Image: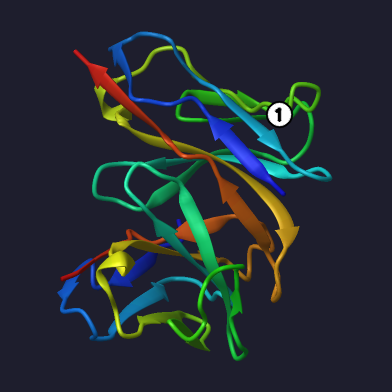
Amino acid sequence: GDSVTQMEGPVTLSEEAFLTINCTYTATGYPSLFWYVQYPGEGLQLLLKATKADDKGSNKGFEATYRKETTSFHLEKGSVQVSDSAVYFCALSGKRVTGGGNKLTFGTGTQLKVEL
Amino acid sequence: GAVVSQHPSRVICKSGTSVKIECRSLDFQATTMFWYRQFPKQSLMLMATSNEGSKATYEQGVEKDKFLINHASLTLSTLTVTSAHPEDSSFYICSARDLASGQETQYFGPGTRLLVL
């Protein structure tokens, strides 16, 4: 079945440091890939997505490139801020479900802590 | 952007009672809503897919008589945990797919933390 593997956290960085959170996946076919972010006490928010190989998703300074050859979708940001502290989830959109839409499979999440 | 709300945000109940959790799409219509469960430091696990006007589709291993789902309108789905027990304590999160967008994006609610004593 589909699965997503993320690096374990927490990841602790100083402000303005470079961020990489690794994500690899296993899936049949050609899934869409997502990064969601969960700020403390809030629900998940879509951060970025890519729907096909070599696509790059980007938002708020974060980027991730869909690499089919390595089945990866690593999240990067050149300069993190304290406000980026949150839990980041990698996910893939797999088989379709009854009624429309596709089932999302999530990684375990990686907590990011950014300090001054 | 699309907003999904959940109510209540937190609930504590006694073992054996039933708890209802509401999930609403506030500014869009959702024919499909999803219910997830999240254990501490673990990923979100899909429990069931809720379709407006029809029966929910449950994931393998999820008891449909234990977790009753009703999707009576295009903006509301409810999850009822029946005869709750301490092992049902968890964080329950819903999401909704925007019908009009025609896209795969799911919008998530803020979650409901359930504690069964």
Residue B4: image location, x then y, percent: 40, 65
Q: Is residue A115 left or right of residue A23?
A: left
Between B77 and B73, the residue placed more toward the observer is B77
Location of residue B11 (image quadrant): bottom left
Q: SS at mark 1? A: loop
Residue B84: image location, x then y, percent: 29, 79
Between B92 and A74, the residue placed more toward the observer is B92
Q: Residue at x 41, y 82 (%)?
A: B78
How many other residues sit within 10 Å of disc 1, few (<14), some (14-19) or many (≥20)? many
Q: Is residue A61 left or right of residue B7?
A: right
Q: Residue at x 27, y 19 (%)?
A: A114
Q: Chain of mark 1?
A: A
Q: Residue at x 58, y 81 (%)?
A: B56
The residue to which callout 1 is attached is A66
State the quadrant of the C terminus of chain A: top left
Q: Is residue A84 left or right of residue A60?
A: left
Residue B62: image location, x then y, percent: 52, 71
Q: How many marks overall?
A: 1
Between B64 and A59, the residue placed more toward the observer is B64
Q: Looking at the picture, does residue B99 appear above or below residue A95?
A: below
Between B10 and B105, the residue placed more toward the observer is B10
